[in-house]
Image (cartoon, rainbow, N blue to C red):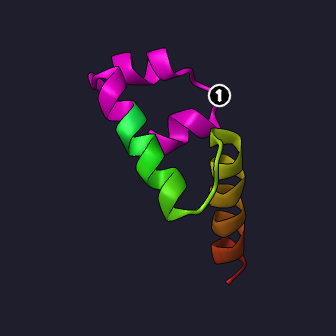
Amino acid sequence: MLRMLSGGSTREAITRTLDISPRTYTTYMAALRERFRVRTNEQLMYELGRRRDTAADG
C-alpha cells in the first residue's frame, strides 16, 4: 500500500487493487499518521521517504 501511495495511486485504485474496503484503508492510514505523528498523507509520505533515505545511508 505504501509503495502505491508513494507512486501517486489514488485511494480508489489502492482499495480496488488490494481488495480492501475504503474503511480499512482509512483506518490503516490514520494509524500510520498517528504512529509517525503527522497530520496529512503528504506529511506521512515525506516522513517515510526521509526515514528510508536515512536507512539507506547507513
The quarter of the picture where residue 16 lies is: top left
Residue 28 location (% of width, % of height):
38, 43
- Check the image and report above or below for 19 versus 54: above
Point out the stretch of residues depicted in magenta. 1-25
Label 1 crowding class (10 Å Cα cut-off): few <14, some 14-19, many 20+?
A: few
Q: Is residue 25 left or right of residue 12?
A: left
Q: Is residue 46 left or right of residue 4?
A: right
Residue visible at 57% across and 35% down in the picture: 5
Residue drawn at 70 percent across, 41 percent down: 42
**Which residue is denoted by mark 1 in the rendering?**
8
Is residue 2 in the magenta section?
yes
Considering only vertical position in the picture, is 37 above or below 18?
below
Q: Quadrant of residue 6?
A: top right
In the rendered image, which quarter contains the N terminus?
A: top left
The answer to which quarter of the image holds residue 47 is: bottom right
* Foreground of the two, 54 or 56: 54
- Secondary structure found at label 1: loop
Location of residue 18 with respect to 36 vertically, above or below: above
Give the vertical position of 11 relative to 57 (above or below).
Answer: above
Q: Residue placed at 56% from the left, 63% from the top? A: 36
> How many numbered markers are drawn?
1
Q: Amino acid at mark 1?
A: Gly
Q: Position of residue 58 (x, y in %)?
A: 67, 84
Residue at 36 percent of width and 39 percent of height: 27
Is the stretch drawn in magenta largely helix, strand or loop?
Answer: helix
Image spot of residue 46 (x, y percent) = 72, 52
